[in-house]
Image (cartoon, grey):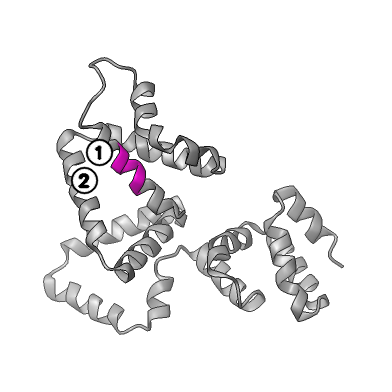
Amino acid sequence: MKVAALCALVLLAGAASAQAPAPAGAPDAAALRQTLAPFDTLLAGLPPVLRERLELHARAWLALSPEAQARLRLDLTAWDDLAPQEKLALRERFDAWEHLDEPTRGAVLQAEARLAQMPAEVRAGWRARFDALSPEQRRRYRFDPPTRAAMDLAGQLFPFVPAEEHADTLALLRALTPAQVDALRRELRRLPPNRRDAFRVRLLEQDVQGRAALLDAAP
């Protein structure tokens, strides 16, 4: 299940638990357990990084005021009414934001603030320029420079990555050092085309040390 969908489920669970709040003075840990309780079985099968992310979202829910929780419940109801294609587009934007590094997130928020201060006709001009780009060009602006570089590298080395492995492959390529990228290129040139994707999958199955060992062994 996509992380965005899981986060929505956690928030919905929080919305339900808000109807019967814990006694005043209850420890925060108890409220957190109550919010996550419907997903105990699901959480047990998730990797640690996803469990931690969902716990952060649950804590964010508990930190909201009752008014903010009510607004979020309305937003989640509106989400259910969206067409599948609209949901897919929003999930892609969410995933892209999740993968931005902190400097790029800060730059985006600063740019948003500057844009909001511009005259309406200037904002319209920037919007027209953006809308004139191809869909692929517009999509690239969702990602930070390291991710865009990884996307270019993935296109060169692994042009047919399955959709469900795309994010993991980008994360893998982002984490490689320049020397490791050179080693990867050499190894792929050595392999026949029908074995190159299997090497990508093998890299994904390794931890950082295992990947380094595989690439260091490349001739």
Q: Is residue 165 left or right of residue 210?
A: left
Q: What are the residue bounds of the magenta stretch?
A: 8-13
Give the secondary structure at mark 2.
helix
Q: Residue at x 18, y 76 (%)?
A: 124
**What's the amino acid at mark 2?**
Arg
Q: Is residue 150 above or below residue 16?
A: below
Q: Which quadrant holds residue 84?
A: bottom left
The answer to whether mark 1 and mark 2 are in CB contact below 8 A is yes
- Please determine whether, in this image, residue 174 is positioned above or below residue 207: below
Q: Which quarter of the figure has residue 23? A: top left
The disc at residue 15 is 1
Residue 40: image location, x then y, percent: 46, 35
- Kindly identify the residue that appears in the image at 24 percent across and 81 percent down: 128
Disc 2: which residue: 73
Q: Could you tell me which residue is drawn at 33 percent across and 71 percent down?
A: 85
Residue 119 location in percent, x, y?
13, 69
Report whether 36 appears left or right of 169.
Answer: left
Amino acid beneath label 1: Ala
Residue closer to the observer: 23 or 148: 23
Asked if the magenta segment contains residue 94, the reply would be: no
Assess whether residue 11 is covered by the magenta stretch.
yes
Pinpoint residue 37: horizontal percent, then vertical percent: 40, 32
Q: Position of residue 174 (x, y in %)?
A: 59, 60
Numbered-mark total: 2
Q: Residues within 10 Å of mark 1 (few under 14, many from 20)?
A: many
The answer to whether 211 appears left or right of 14 in the picture is right
Q: Is residue 128 above or below residue 213?
A: below
Q: Main secondary structure of the magenta part?
A: helix
Hey, which quadrant is residue 67 in on the image?
top left
Tell me the crowding category of disc 2: few under 14, some 14 to 19, or many 20 or more residues within 10 angstroms, Cα based: some
Relative to 73, 85 lies left or right? right
